[in-house]
Amino acid sequence: MPLMSFNSEELLYHFITLLIIVTFGSGFTRLFASAFSKTKPDGEKAGFEFNPLANLDILGTIVFILGGFGWGRQVDDQKIRFKRQKLGWFLLSLIAPYASLSLALGAAYIKHFFWTDRVVEVLISVSVAVTAYHIIPIPPLFGSRLIYLVLPGERVWRIFSKFGPFIILGLVLIDRFSGTPFLREMMAPVVDVITKFALYY
């Protein structure tokens, strides 16, 4: 659910959740990219970035505010190379949705057995949404890597990945302000399935 719909307390809970999600998703992505790639960009170190603000992405945060999902700072796949580039990045791109799903499962476990505070519920709902929206086949979301696998070369992918975040932002703006929430309606069944999976005990 978009952040523009909430009061100040809810905004605080969602902002905390955003920081947690991007820290785990982007942090672990950068960690594994640095650790297992053949080449690393200048200044790239193999390590987990614990600073949440360093993992924020401007467009990803805007999409989060307007659409209720988003992404963290990305690693440049033209600078970090794997022995099998496409397969390496396909597997690496699984980390962000897996991190979000793990957070949803962990929060659901806490809610069921230990603590039922509102912030836990927000962590579940937002983590589920981020996980679900990753199936959209537009960069930098995970679904786009399925397209990346079948592209014959990387030139088209470079253009697609460059404009992908702006395409997503445009879709979210249309969904949010056109009066027809087509994106939310399309993703609702996926969100429902993942929510039931996370809350199944």
Image: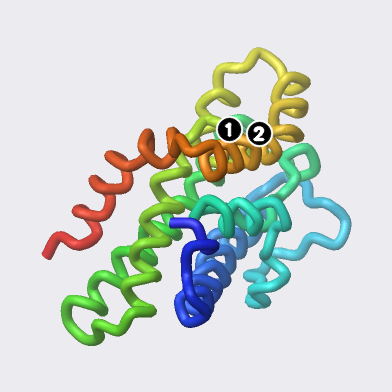
In front of the other: 147 or 126: 126
Q: Quadrant of residue 10?
A: bottom left
Q: Circle 1 is placed at which residue position?
A: 138
Residue pushed farthest front? 179
In front of the other: 135 or 89: 135
Q: Quadrant of residue 81?
A: top right
Measure the C-alpha gap from mark 2 to mark 1.
8 Å
- The local secondary structure at tag 2 comes to helix
Q: Amino acid at mark 2?
A: Ile
The residue located at (70%, 51%) in the rendering is 59
Q: Are marks 2 and 1 in contact (CB under 8 Å)?
A: yes
The residue located at (52%, 51%) in the rendering is 67
Q: Which mark is residue 167?
A: 2
Q: Is 93 situated left or right of 128 in this image? A: right
- Indicate whether 30 appears above or below 194: below
Q: How far from the left and from the top, in percent, is residue 63?
A: 60, 51
- Quarter of the image that includes the N terminus: bottom left
The residue located at (65%, 55%) in the rendering is 62
